[in-house]
Amino acid sequence: MAAIVILLSLIVPTLILPKLLPALGVESSDDINQVRNEMVDYAILHMAQEIEDSKVRSSLTKQLQSQKGLQIPDHNKSSKLMDDIITWQETLLDTPTIKTQFSPTIVDYFRIYLENISKHSTSKRIRRLFSKRGRGRRTDSVEMEEFTLLRNDLSRLEDILYQETMERLSELEKERLENKTIDFSDIEEVKHILENRHYRIRNDIQEDTIIPNELLIEAFQLEYQFVLNQAKSDMISKETSNKLFKEINNAQVLQLQKQ
C-alpha cells in the first residue's frame, strides 16, 4: 500500500496536473524563484503546525528549504543567538532546581565552561579538573572515584541544560512560524553547535533524524497544491507551473530514495 501511495504521489503531479492548466506567458527567472520560495514556505508553515516532534520538524524544514538553493547563513546573527543562549544557560545555573541537584563546585565548574565556550578556550581551572591532583596524598583509586563522580555530575548538568535549551530553541521556531517568519538559519546553526557539544561530552554517536515517508509526501503534496492554486488563479504561467511540478517531483524522488 505504501508503495502505491508513493507511486501515485509521483504520477499525478507529473502527468495529470500539467494537462489541467491553461497556457499563459513565460515567467522570468526572478518570478520563478519568488514563487518557489513562497511554495516552500507554504509547505513549511502547514507541516510545522502538524508535527510535534521538534527534531522531525526541524529536519523536514531543512529538507524543504534546500529546494530554494544555496542559502548562506548569517553568522553574525547566529553568533548573537549563541551569546543569548549562553547567557540564558548561565541564569539557569542560579535556579533552585539546579542548586538543589548539584553542588556549588559542579555549578561553578560548569559556569566557567560556559564562559569559555565563546572564546574557544578552556581555563586552567577546568584543565586541572582533568589532571592528576593531590599527588602523594591519596591513592589513585580514590582520585579516580572522585573524578568519575565529578565528571558524571557535570555530564548530568549538561544534559539538563541541553534539553532545556533545545526546548527553548523549538519555542523560538514556533514563535517565528506564528509570525510567518521562515528564516531558521541561525537557530539551526546554534542547534548544530549545541548538539555537537552535547554528544562530544557524552561520548555518544549522533544519529540522523529519520523523516517518515508519509510526512515527506504530505509536504510535497502541499507544494503541488500551492502551485496548482497559483496557476488556476492565473498568478503564474503554465510554463512556470510545469517547471515547478518537475522540480517538486525530482526533489520528492531524491528524498524518498534517501529514506
Image: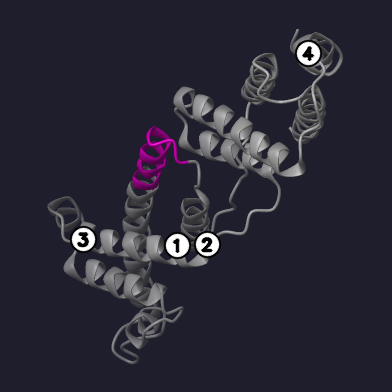
Q: Kindly identify the amino acid type of the residue bearing the numbered disc 3.
A: Thr
Q: Nearer the viewer, mark 1 or mark 4?
A: 4
| Residue 170 colored in magenta in the image | yes
Give how far apart the Cα atoms at labels 3 and 1 are.
21 Å
Marks 2 and 1 close (CB-CB < 8 Å)? yes
- Residue 99 placement, left or right of 56: left
Q: Is residue 237 magenta?
A: no
Q: Seen in the image, is 109 located left or right of residue 131?
A: left
For mark 4, give the secondary structure. Answer: loop
In the rendered image, which quarter is residue 61 located in? top right
The residue wearing badge 4 is 21
The chosen color scheme is one colour
User: Of circles 3 and 1, which is in front?
Assistant: 1
Q: Earlier in the sequence, mark 1 or mark 4?
A: 4
Foreground of the two, 250 or 244: 244
Element type at mark 1? helix
> Which residue is labeled 3 in the image?
91
Q: Which residue sits at x=19%, y=64%?
A: 103
Q: Position of residue 250 (x, y in %)?
A: 82, 31
Above-or-below relation of 220 to 94: above
Q: Amino acid at mark 2?
A: Asp
Q: Which amino acid lies under the numbered mark 4 shown in the image of this protein?
A: Leu
Judging by the rendered image, the residue that carries numbered circle 2 is: 74
Which region is colored magenta?
168-181
Residue drawn at point x = 78 percent, y = 16 percent: 13
Q: Which residue is mark 1?
A: 77
Q: Quadrant of the N terminus?
A: top right
